[in-house]
Every structure is written in structure tokens, then in C-alpha cells.
Amino acid sequence: MKVCIIGAGKVGLEIAKRVIEDNHDVVLIDRNGEKLEAIQEKLDVLTLKGNGGTSQVINDPVVTESDMLVAVTSSDEVNIIACMKAKKKGVPQTVARVRDPDYAYDLLATKSEWGIDLLINPEYAAATEIAQQLTLFLPTHTELFADGKVLMAEIDVNDVKINITNKKLSELDFPKSTRVVAISRKGEMLIPSGNDFLLPGDRIYVLGNLKSISQLCYRLKGKKRRVQNVMILGGGRIGYYLASKLDSMGIKVKLVERDGEKCEELAERLPNVLVLKADGTDIDFLQDEGVKDTDAFVAVTGFDEENLLISLMAKQMGARQVVAKVSRPSYAAMVERLGVDHAVSPRLITVSEILRFIRGGKLLNMFVLPNGQAEVVELIVQKDSRLVNKSLQGAGLPKGVIVGAILRNNKAIIPEGKEVINEGDRLVVFSLGNYLKKVEALAGSGGI
């Protein structure tokens, strides 16, 4: 497969790296020739300098002969035009990143008319994830799989009511239908065995069905209070989308933004939201606005450092939950250690969605962990897979791969090693990044 990526920014580069790992050919297009030269020294890619929205670039054979075009430049217009022109030139599939709310709303209904097969709005997707985490009844960050029948909970071992540190995983009194699939320790992701110990500062990822994960979370962290009021720092696109979503759920929202013109625009668009023109990093302001009585504080400014710092300040001042937007994967480990409840990365959300689309029908769902070192994928075992009629312990899975759950006959199973895989089983698989290709092979011809 040949994938043409327009835009060699952070998202485009991350997609290129992962597509190359899948043994696909990549063409990377950008206006910046120096950037392309530097990338060519590190990655096995073909590069083309130019404006991806022009006919001169789109008509080049390296583009027209591609199987897919992914447009992720900083310009919505260039991304839309590139997809439209590429489709007319016969490129089978196109993907566009579109951020502007007006464009996004218009194109969602008519994207096929513009020649766009997948439209991804990172800020809207990030706001959706934040809203889900704030309003979910469980007191910790979770991801849903298998139509909501399988959950993966992320739990900080320091932030629980009972001591679970310095104990073997096999000694923990966790519900039967749960499985610890990974431990994040000092920024490194580990695939554990029952003999591994939990250490202070660890963050564990636990897969289970809805009932068992609920029991575990309530036991470790207590029941979660319903979110009734939220303070959002940052009136950019994420702040706007999130405020709109929470308002529609009947939640009281305060939206804090420094820029006066932006405040006026937000107040006009969000009549039920209290928009405040202020410096949200001012401790006196936060105290005056009652951050200590806030159910959730969300920092989504354009600066990772500011989001992390202010979220932690809000937590210390009494906010029950704090959420920070982070763009740099290198900050993920810091977020875990410092005590932010949830970290959301629009970049990783974008990469996950586009990669799932590129990889086609094998993957029903895909989630990239915040540190980028591991992924959770959901796939269906095909009849010609070598896994069919084999037990998990006899399937020859590499150490970096765990089948954490199976959906069979609409029932979620947390499997033991003796569990036999059937044709048509829906698997939720946790994988370290370097094993992803082997994970995907589970679903197709030849097995793993």
C-alpha cells in the first residue's frame, strides 16, 4: 500500500513512522525543503517539496498513483482542496484534518461531496473524550471497547483508598473478571506477570467487563460524585466544543479566556455559559471564582506547561477532578507522576483515528496510550487465522502482547491461558508498539 501524507508536522510525521512500521510505502509532502531533508535522514520515505493543495503537486505521479492521501497541514483549506483534487485524480481514499468549527460542521454532512472519506477534527474529538470522562460514573479514566461491554481502567496506585503497593499482582484481591494488562512505571510501559510487584508511583491498566471494573473502581476509589459544575481554562476550539457539550448536558460551565474579542465571540455562541475575561493562571482569581468547590477543572490552553501547572494548582486548591490537554508525548509520564487525573492529547487521538482507517476493516477500534508506547486494538478473528481452535498459552503470542478480553456471543470474557480462541471472536488486545504488526496479523490470513 502506498500512502501519501501532506504535511510533515508532528501529526504527519507520527503517522508516517507508524505506517512505515506496517511495511507500507510513504510519500511525505511539505513546503519546507529543509524539514523534508532532515526527515529523509531518519525515515525511509519519498519526499516531495510543494504546496499540497496545488494541481502541480496533486498531478505528480507519486500522488496520483497512491492508494490513500492523508492531508494534515495546518491549513483546513489546503487539506480540503488536496482531498478534493486527489479524489478527482483517482486516489481511492482520502483523509482530511479539519479544525475550524464552521468547516467541520458543514463538511460532516457533505464530506463525500468534497471527496473526503474520513474527516477528523482533533479538537472536537478531544472535547468529546473529556466530556465522556467527566460524566462517566466511574471514578477514574476509562476507555470503552466491544460496544461498551469491555472497559480498560487507568488507576494510579498512590491515589486509592487501600494500599496495593509492594504486593504481587497475584496477591491482589481484584474481581475475578479483571486483568492487569500493563504497568506504567517512570514513563516506561511494562507487560506484567502475576509475580510482578506494584511499586509506589505505578499506574496500572486493568481490562474487565462493566460489572467487574465498576466493583474494582468503587473498592479502590469510592463512588464518583456527579459532575454539576466545571471550570474551563482556555477559550480555543477545545474549550468551545467542551463548553457546548457540557452545557447541553445541563452542567454549569465557567469558561475563562484572556482575549477580549474571543470572549465576546464565545459569549455570543454560548449564551448559557458564563464567559470570564481573566488570567486563569492567577491564584487569587481562581480562589475568588470558587475553584475549591468545582467538580472539575479543565485546562486546554495552547501551552502544555501552563495546562499542567494550573491543573495541579487547581487540584491543590480543592477541585475534585483536573484534566489537562497535552500535545507532547514526552509529557505523558510527567502527567502520571504529578497527579493530574486525566491527560488528553488531540494529537494522539488524531493519529489513532487515522491509523485505524489506514489499516482498514481488521481493526474495529484502536486506542493509543498517552505515552505512545502501547496501543489497545479491537479485532475479529478470521476463519483462516492460525489462532482459531488454539489456546492463548499455545498460540505463540510474543511477550509484548496480551489478549485482555474476548467478546463471544455478545458476552465479555476475561480469558485465562487455557481459553481457546474461536473463529469470529472479537478480541481486545493490548500491545507494545513494536508488536503492533503481529497483533494485526491475528485477524488476517496466516495468523500471528
Image (cartoon, rainbow, N blue to C red):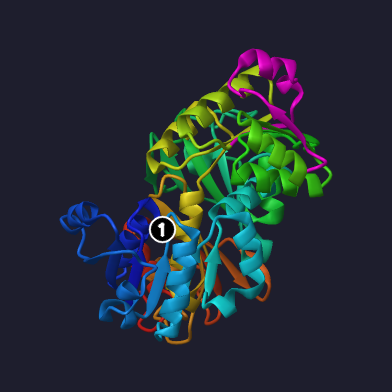
x and y percent of residue 142 in the render? Answer: 61, 48
Of residue 30 and residue 421, the one placed in the foreground of this image is: 30
Name the side, left or right, on which 168 lies relative to 409: left
Quadrant for residue 69, please give it: bottom left
User: Which residue corresponds to mark 1?
Assistant: 73
* Residue 282 is inside the magenta segment: yes
* Mark 1 surroundings within 10 Å by alpha-carbon count, few (fewer than 14), some (14 through 19), many (20 or more): many
Quadrant for residue 442, please give it: bottom left
* Residue 426 is inside the magenta segment: no
**Placement of the C terminus among the 4 image quadrants:** bottom left
x and y percent of residue 96 in the render? Answer: 48, 66
Of residue 236 and residue 163, the one placed in the foreground of this image is: 236
Name the side, left or right, on which 279 lies relative to 205: right
Residue 227 appears in the figure: yes
**Which residue occupies 73% across, 49% down?**
245
Name the side, left or right, on which 305 lies relative to 19: right
Of residue 403 and residue 239, the one placed in the foreground of this image is: 239
**Placement of the N terminus among the 4 image quadrants:** bottom left
Q: Which residues are magenta?
A: 270-299
Residue positioned most to the top: 284
Quadrant for residue 26, please give it: bottom left
Q: Secondary structure at mark 1?
A: loop
Answer above or below: position of 62 versus 236: below
Residue 177 appears in the figure: no
x and y percent of residue 402 in the render? Answer: 44, 59
Answer above or below: position of 204 versus 25: above
**Residue type at tag 1:** Thr
**Which residue occupies 42% across, 36% down?**
331
